[in-house]
Amino acid sequence: MAEEPIRREQRRDTLTGKVMVGYQGWFNCEGDGMDLGWAHWSRNRRRTFGAGNLTVDLWPDMTELDDDERFKTGFVHADGSEAEVFSSANRKTVARHFRWMQEYGIDGAFLQRFASGLRRQDQQRHKDAVLEHVRAGADASGRSYAVMYDLSGLPADGCGLVRDDWAKLRNRGIPADLAYQHHEGKPVVAIWGIGFNDGEKPREYTLSECRELIELLKEDGCCVMLGVPTGWREQNRDSTIDDDLHGVLELADIISPWTVGRYRNEDGIERHARDYLRPDLQWCSERQIDYLPVVFPGFSWHNLTGDKLGAIPRVKGEFLKSQLDAAIQSRCKMIYVAMFDEVDEGTAIFKCTNDPPTGHGAKFLTYEDLPSDHYLKLTGQAARQLRDKLNKDNE
């Protein structure tokens, strides 16, 4: 399923007409050289990743991975074979993921770089390694990538970690990469986590700190994308209520509301498009700000939190397809699919198996007997549909 040829510089110079994915890149395995144990596979990363010690609801399809990409776990499949997973610290595996993006026509990825982890040397070492793997994988496959800083968990004054880290990345030539995603002539840097209302435990970093960070990045010549709550425009639902919020968001070049878990079925998708997506798009258009809607295939974090397995059903891809259709028909110019590799919360679109481990009370989702590449195909088809719609609208 080869994508039509396209010059690399054409692919990376704009987000218009692109369907991007989020790439966590946060999975570690015992023996991968990072000394982080089974991070993001297990609850206790220093114990064997097996029954009673897991946090993921989907199991990756390991069929295509080579022997040096496989890490044996404490789980077994129904036929008695040892169940294996991958590590994001493996350069070959990350390159393979970007080849999948190329094969199915997905344009590129926002690499998640959690700012709170920049305080720990071991975690930063892993983040830097994955960033280098992503750079190489995106370049080799003709895809793009951009850094997305997630501010979740930062203390007061923590935005300085992002400021200092971006300065280091710029010195390493990251935004000058041919593969680095640009928009309107500027390298894209995403800041996720501005304006959220977290209830009883409010975020410690302030809007004032966020404003300072955004202004610094813009002065540095960046195109700044902001990840914001669903209710940002009317300051309801998951949004903080603050007179300064809109003033900060108006500094953005791109606004991207987080919608994972905010609706659960077809009716919810229609209500969201009517009450949020289209009015949001209008608000941004009036201020010459680009709008990047987030869509997701389903949601499940049973093994992470004890919630119901498959809490937001995928309905064999129809849930994701309806969101993609709504975004395209609403004349959005770009789309963000969350996420490529997020098996922790059951939002992954990469290849997952219908034959997960069994026994010892472990429960996993499957792709409902669909081919393991079904969601990759669906996402790539949406990219082509988006470009077709934009071309027709511009005729």
Image: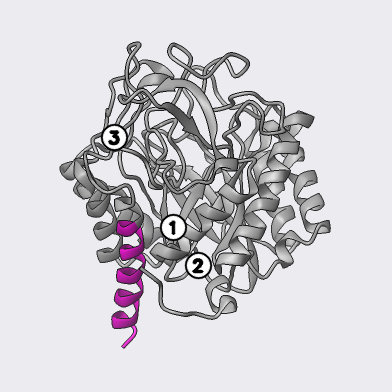
Q: Position of residue 220 (x, y in %)?
A: 76, 61
Q: Depth check: 249 or 161 in front? A: 161
Residue, disc 2? 15
Numbered badge on residue 366: 3
Q: Residue furthest bottom?
A: 395
Magenta-tinted stretch = 377-395
Spatial CA span between label 2 and label 1:
9 Å
Q: Amino acid at mark 2?
A: Leu
Does residue 246 show up?
no
User: Badge 1 is on which residue?
Assistant: 292
x%, y% of residue 228? 49, 44
Left or right of 337 in this view: 172: right
Magenta span dominant secondary structure: helix
Residue drawn 46% across the image and 42% down it:
341
Which residue is pictured at 43% across the width and 43% down the height? 232
Quadrant (top left/top right/bottom left/bottom right) for the N terminus: bottom left
Residue 389 in the image, given as x and y percentages of width and height: 29, 75
Q: Is residue 338 visible?
A: yes
Q: Nearer the viewer, residue 378 or 79?
A: 79
The number of callouts visible is 3
